[in-house]
Amino acid sequence: MLTVHKVGAADTAGYAAYLASQAPGPGARADGARRGDYYLGPKGQPAEGPGQWMGQGAVALGLAGTVDREELQRVWAGQDPQTGDALVRHARGTHVAAVDATFSAPKSVSVVWALAGPEARAALEAAHDRAVAVGVAHVERHAALVRRRVGGQVRHEPAQSLVIARFRHHTSRQSAAQQAAGATPDPQLHDHCVIAILALRSADAPARTGRWAAIDSRALYQLRAEAGAVYRAELAAQLQRLGYRMARQG
C-alpha cells in the first residue's frame, strides 16, 4: 500500500523528529504521540531510526548515507544543504516542504516479520527494500512532478531525479488505548520515503531558473494507487522467491 501525505513548512521540525523516532522537542506534545516507532530496541525501548538518502538528486547535492537533521530541514526549505542558498522559490512559511510517500507491507507480511527469527526477518526486510526501490523508481519515471512554463504554457513533466529521505519503521502509531494500557503498538513494516520540494530538471529541458525545480505534489496523489500496486507486485515476487505462498484478495 502507498499513502501520500504533505509536510508543510511549519511542521518540518516535528515531522523530522517523528520520522527519526526521536523524543519530542520543545513545544511538542509531552506524551510523545508523534514518535515514529516504539520498540526498535531489543527489549522494547524506543530508539532512534536514522534515515538514508535516496535518489540521484540527493547525490547531486552531496547527500549520501545517513540523513542529517540540519541538512534535511535545509532541503525541505528548498535550500542547498551545504550552503543554505535558495535553489527554488516558494512562498515563505506556507509552502509544501516535502511529500511523505509511505510504502507499507500487507498486515500478513508484518506479522510474519514480527514472529520470524533474525535470518528470516532480514530476508523479509530485503524483499521490502527491493519492492520500495521499484515503487520509488516508478514514481520517478512516471509522476509529472515538475511544473514548467514553456512559451507561455504551463507543462508538467517527470523530473530527472528526486531527493528522498527514507526512514524505516516497524510498528504502527500507538493508539490512545494501547498507550493507556502500556501495550506496544501493532507490527507494521513500512518505509517513509519523504520526497523533498527539490527536484532535478530533466537534462533535455533547460530553463532560465537553473537545474532545480519545486515539485507539484498533485501528480503524486494521482499516481499513488498505481505506484502502490507496483510495490505490492514486486514484494509478492520477492516473497515467492523466498518460498512464501501468495493468496489474492479482493
Image (spheres, rainbow, N blue to C red):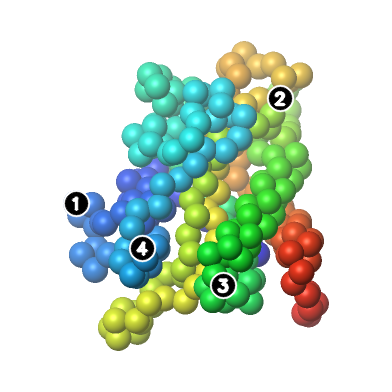
Q: CA distance from mark 4 to mark 3?
A: 16 Å
10 Å neighbourhood of mark 1: few (<14), some, or many (≥20)? Answer: few
> Judging from the image, what secondary structure is the residue with disc 3 in?
loop
Question: Viewed as shown, does residue 74 lie left or right of 6?
Answer: left
CB within 8 Å, label 3 to label 2: no
Q: Which residue is mark 2?
A: 202
Which label's residue is closer to the chain start, 1 or 4? 1
- In the rendered image, residue 3, in percent from the top left (x then y), is placed at 59, 60
Give amino acid for label 4.
Gly
**Which residue has dot 4 on it?**
41
Instruction: Judge whether 240 appears above or below 148 on screen.
Output: below
Q: Disc 3 and disc 2: Cα gap in Å?
A: 43 Å
Q: Earlier in the sequence, mark 1 or mark 2?
A: 1
Dot 3, how many residues are within 10 Å of its Cα: few (below 14), some (14-19), or many (20+)?
Answer: some
Q: Residue 14 location in percent, x, y?
A: 33, 51
For the residues marked 3 and 1, what is the alpha-carbon distance in whole angstroms?
Answer: 38 Å
Question: On the image, numbered disc 1 is attached to which residue?
Answer: 26
Earlier residue among tags 3 and 2: 3
Up-down: is 15 above or below 86? below
At mark 2, the secondary structure is: loop
The structure residue drawn at horizontal position 66% and vertical position 17%, both measured from the top left corner, is: 207
State whether residue 68 appears in this view.
yes
Nearest to N terminus: mark 4 or mark 2: 4
On residue 116, which mark appears? 3
**Foreground residue among 183 and 194:** 183
- Residue 222, relative to residue 155: is it above or below? below
Toward the viewer: 221 or 31?
A: 31
